[in-house]
């Protein structure tokens, strides 16, 4: 089963993808995480992507489709994928349809997560991540149980993304509205769009997503 989590920056795509990975045999595929890993590793793709990402613009379709195509050949994603942050343009959506079709697979559901702009800005500017294991937190909405200590691995080092400032978030929102939001109609046309309220608490959003998954399996 292949799912797409579609939503603006801060909608909760990464948060929910990590929760849904457990128990469904699905693997999160976040193009943002993959590009950040390439940047940290200093690869050619990473170096090319860095400036574009820091400005909040989109990395070229060729680069992104290339890394997704390679990733989909790996053994750990054969049971199904939760696409997080991909596709982001109609060219990427068409390329994904083709890639999956060549493997005898398809997109089973697209879950659009709706969140108000001001809530998105608040979520992004309060976000931080464990430097060691990558667990995501929020200053107000998802605090570690012990202040300054990662729940999962005990590390006391945290990082923030360079693109997580108010100015870049507003730019990313504009990019989303212009280049990615048209995908809502694209997938509605394919008949597999599910819209959920992303403003609810993290656990309630998970419940809404689980309901969609149950519907698909029924
Ligand atoms: P990417 O990494 O995909 O970033 P994004 O789409 O901007 O989304 P975010 O990761 O910021 O938000 P999220 O929805 O995952 O939210 P999260 O769960 O963390 O892309 C980064 C850049 O890479 C792009 O700008 C582009 O340059 C490039 N790129 C990536 N993919 C590309 C592609 N396909 N094509 C071209 N370029 C590409 O939640 C946010 C915070 O809110 C967290 O702190 C969390 O704890 C909190 N939170 C989550 N849910 C809730 C809730 N329900 N209530 C309260 N708080 C919540
Ligand atoms: Mg994310
Ligand atoms: Zn950790």
Image: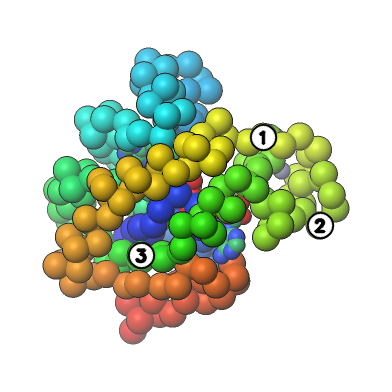
Which of label 3 and label 2 is nearer to you? 3
* Residue 71 x/y as whole percent: 34, 38
* Identity of the residue drawn at 23% across and 70% down: 192
Compared to residue 97, the image places residue 92 above or below, namely: above
Mark number displayed over residue 145? 2
* Identity of the residue drawn at 35% across and 34% down: 57
Disc 3: which residue: 112
Q: Is residue 170 visible?
A: yes
* Identity of the residue drawn at 55% across and 30% down: 162
Give the Cα distance between marks 3 and 2: 30 Å
Q: Is residue 67 visible?
A: no
Question: Badge 2: few (under 14), some or many (20 or more) residues near its Cα, within 10 Å?
Answer: few
Disc 1: which residue: 159
Question: Badge 1: few (under 14), some or many (20 or more) residues near its Cα, within 10 Å?
Answer: few
Give the Cα distance between marks 3 and 1: 28 Å
Question: Badge 3: few (under 14), some or many (20 or more) residues near its Cα, within 10 Å?
Answer: many
Q: Earlier in the sequence, mark 2 or mark 1?
A: 2
The residue carrying mark 2 has its beta carbon less than 8 Å from ligand 3: no
* Residue 212 x/y as whole percent: 39, 76
Q: For mark 3, give the secondary structure.
A: strand
Q: Earlier in the sequence, mark 3 or mark 1?
A: 3
Give the Cα distance between marks 2 and 1: 17 Å
Q: Earlier in the sequence, mark 3 or mark 2?
A: 3
- Image side of residue 122 versus residue 210, left or right: right
Please identify the quadrant where the C terminus is shown: bottom left
Compared to residue 12, the image places residue 39 above or below, namely: above
């Amino acid at each position: 089963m292949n799912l797409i989590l579609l939503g603006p920056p801060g909608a909760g795509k990464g948060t929910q993808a990590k929760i849904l990975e457990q128990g469904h045999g699905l693997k999160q595929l976040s193009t943002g995480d993959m590009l950040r890993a390439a940047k940290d590793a200093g690869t050619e793709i990473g170096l090319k992507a860095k400036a574009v990402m820091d400005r909040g613009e989109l990395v070229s379709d060729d680069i992104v489709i290339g890394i997704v195509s390679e990733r989909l050949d790996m053994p750990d994603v054969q049971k199904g994928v939760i696409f997080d942050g991909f596709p982001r343009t109609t060219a990427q959506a068409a390329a994904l349809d083709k890639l999956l079709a060549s493997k005898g697979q398809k997109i089973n559901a697209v879950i659009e997560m709706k969140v108000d702009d001001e809530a998105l800005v608040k979520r992004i500017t309060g976000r931080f991540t464990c430097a060691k294991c990558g667990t995501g937190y929020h200053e107000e909405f998802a605090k570690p149980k012990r202040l300054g200590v990662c729940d999962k691995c005990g590390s006391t080092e945290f990082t923030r993304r360079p693109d997580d400032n108010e100015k870049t978030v507003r730019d990313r929102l504009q990019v989303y509205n212009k280049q990615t939001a048209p995908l809502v109609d694209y997938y509605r046309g394919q008949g597999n769009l599910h819209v959920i309220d992303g403003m609810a608490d993290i656990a309630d959003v998970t419940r809404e997503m689980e309901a969609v998954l149950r519907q698909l399996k029924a």
